[in-house]
């Protein structure tokens, strides 16, 4: 194949690795698209034809889809800390890129992008002709404004932790009305995927003043007609949305989306979808195998399984006693009977973890032995740390995450022989997330990320001033770990990245601040009349192309 000068040279290296069996087809597609090759062109290079998404039956326009979920309060989109807060926003505002259910990243508000040879300069090309729902045109000024909001320390966005290590506000240059260039402080492969991190919604720089609901101006397919946080949101179809459907008319197909907050009680949500009161259950906050087991044989409902990098993370604040002592942290991690936890907390619907935040299906994953349950070794470590008589600790959990509560209860029982006397502090989920970075000891749900580097940069490093980044809830910063992660961020060769990750995983297992006993499957739950809904590992809901039969 003749080389195209517009294609990053590393793409041809990836194709060679794919042809020689060093990369899977999916890994090749992921890396090629990150470097700016379209999904269609990358598929051709991999000898793969991707069929269109045409529906088997004619699409029907109109109707209102009713969703049971959390009608969360919305202020600054960049401050979104959990998916439920972004579900409504995603219908009204949009992202520069879109990472699909196969972890392939596509242009969205961007038309394309190009990376320099060493990944330190990225040129972003914005689609022309897109308008916000108040009539203003999307331009480079809006994108630059949004970047600077993400990087503003006073805003406090998790994006500052994710991208602030390689990008500063002064290193963003406007080249034209529809083109900007990023000058990175270090090489970074995952820039396009970072742009789909759920707080990375693009804002209207002319009208945004810190509270989105005051001026809810986005480029998305719906507008907010009415809102009452905690109860109901009603979203109405835009007639001038920039994308068109299979019938060549403007999307979306639906007239409206009604978002109903039915509370956290599982039985209430189950009754609602079985009776037809709602069409979709948003499971991003309370999802689990309970829903799958209850609905899998119901003819009026589809429960679509999705393997993910979602985890329930046992996290310890290393800047507070007793968790500042690695022997105490390791002792508690040794009290996890992982097979038992996965079986009884999650009905074996997932994969075992080994206390490092890298998922077995991440391309960088380095296979490690799953640690065994060892209360005797844990008791010995506690004695070495000065707790020969055992230790009292309080474990914070969100009471509506049923698998989290089961995990905590199993850990409490199994850690007792080692000398841990665990008191559980149960609270509503929203109360947990108000203080999630402040607990000495807790279990925090973390969602799926397509690359291992993404969550590492979000949760386990420091900023330029040496302070833990916004989502580093454990305050754990390890200089050796950080240097190796920075090296991995800019390493193109997948084999080389995996070798670095073998070391990163070792460090996190031996002296890190977390326990991860298992990775969760999730389910997209919808009534049978809902058509073309796309299951996503983050359980993101997108209603631009959904229709009702």
Image (spheres, helix red, strand yellow):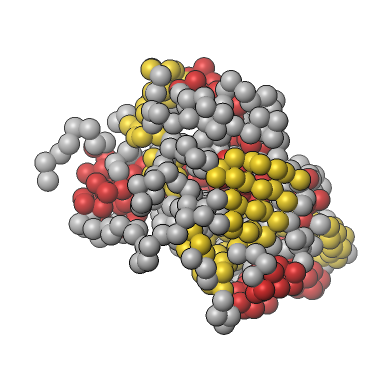
- Is residue 532 in view from this perspective? yes
- Is residue 122 in view from this perspective? no
Question: What is the count of numbered marks?
Answer: 0
Of all residues shown, which one is farthest toward the left? Answer: 2
**Image spot of residue 29 (x, y percent):** 32, 51
**Image spot of residue 169 (x, y percent):** 54, 21
**Image spot of residue 184 (x, y percent):** 44, 26
Relative to 501, 314 lies left or right: right
Relative to 437, 131 lies left or right: left
Relative to 235, 369 lies left or right: left
| Residue 13 position by quadrant | top left
Of all residues shown, which one is farthest toward the bottom? Answer: 297
Q: In front: 93, or 161?
A: 93
Q: Residue at x 44, y 31 (%)?
A: 130
Q: Residue at x 35, y 52 (%)?
A: 246
Relative to 40, 500 lies left or right: right
Q: In front: 83, or 346?
A: 83
| Residue 461 position by quadrant | top right
| Residue 189 position by quadrant | top left
Name above or below for residue 8 compared with residue 348.
above
Q: Residue at x 70, y 40 (%)?
A: 74
Name above or below for residue 83 compared with residue 361.
above
Q: In front: 505, or 48?
A: 48
**Image spot of residue 222 (x, y percent):** 56, 43
Q: Residue at x 69, y 35 (%)?
A: 213
């Amino acid at each position: 194949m003749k080389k195209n000068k517009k294609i990053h040279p590393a793409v041809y290296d990836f194709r060679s690795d794919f042809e020689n069996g060093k990369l899977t087809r999916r890994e090749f597609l992921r890396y090629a698209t990150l470097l700016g090759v379209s999904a269609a062109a990358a598929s051709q290079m991999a000898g793969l034809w991707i069929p269109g998404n045409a529906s088997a039956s004619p699409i029907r326009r109109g109707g209102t889809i009713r969703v049971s979920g959390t009608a969360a309060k919305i202020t600054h989109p960049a401050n979104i800390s959990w998916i439920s807060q972004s579900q409504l926003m995603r219908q009204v505002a949009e992202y520069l890129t879109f990472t699909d259910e196969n972890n392939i990243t596509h242009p969205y508000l961007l038309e394309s992008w190009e990376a320099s040879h060493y990944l330190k300069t990225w040129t972003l090309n914005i689609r022309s002709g897109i308008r916000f729902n108040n009539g203003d045109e999307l331009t480079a000024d809006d994108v630059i404004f949004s970047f600077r909001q993400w990087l503003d320390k006073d805003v406090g966005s998790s994006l500052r932790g994710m991208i602030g290590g390689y990008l500063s506000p002064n290193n963003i240059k406007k080249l034209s009305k529809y083109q900007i260039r990023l000058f990175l402080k270090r090489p970074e492969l995952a820039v396009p995927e970072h742009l789909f991190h759920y707080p990375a919604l693009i804002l209207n720089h002319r009208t945004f003043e810190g509270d989105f609901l005051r001026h809810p101006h986005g480029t998305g397919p719906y507008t907010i007609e009415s809102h009452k946080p905690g109860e109901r949101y009603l979203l109405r179809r835009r007639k001038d949305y920039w994308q068109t459907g299979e019938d060549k008319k403007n999307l979306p197909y639906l007239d409206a989306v009604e978002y109903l907050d039915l509370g956290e009680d599982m039985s209430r949500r189950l009754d609602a979808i079985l009776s037809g009161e709602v069409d979709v259950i948003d499971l991003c906050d309370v999802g689990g195998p309970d829903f799958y087991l209850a609905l899998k044989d119901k003819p009026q409902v589809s429960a679509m399984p999705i393997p993910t990098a979602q985890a329930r993370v046992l996290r310890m604040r290393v800047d507070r006693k007793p968790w500042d002592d690695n022997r105490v942290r390791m002792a508690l991690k040794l009290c996890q009977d992982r097979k038992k936890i996965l079986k009884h907390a999650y009905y074996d619907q997932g994969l075992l973890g080994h206390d490092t935040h890298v998922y077995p299906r991440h391309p960088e994953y380095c296979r490690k032995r799953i640690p065994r349950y060892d209360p005797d070794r844990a008791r010995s470590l506690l004695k070495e740390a000065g707790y020969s008589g055992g230790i009292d600790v309080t474990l914070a959990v969100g009471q509506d995450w049923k698998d989290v509560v089961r995990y905590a209860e199993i850990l409490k029982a199994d850690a007792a022989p080692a000398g841990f006397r665990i008191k559980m502090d149960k609270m509503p989920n929203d109360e947990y997330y108000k203080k999630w970075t402040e607990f000495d000891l807790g279990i925090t749900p973390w969602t799926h990320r397509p690359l291992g580097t993404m969550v590492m940069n979000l949760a386990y490093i420091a900023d330029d001033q040496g302070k833990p980044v916004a989502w580093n809830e454990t305050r754990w910063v390890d200089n050796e770990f950080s240097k190796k992660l920075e090296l991995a961020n800019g390493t193109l060769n997948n084999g080389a990245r995996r070798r670095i990750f073998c070391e990163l995983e070792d460090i996190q297992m031996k002296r890190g601040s977390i326990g991860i006993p298992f990775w969760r499957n999730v389910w997209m739950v919808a009534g049978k009349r809902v058509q073309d809904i796309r299951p996503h590992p983050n359980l993101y809901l997108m209603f631009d192309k959904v229709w009702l039969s």
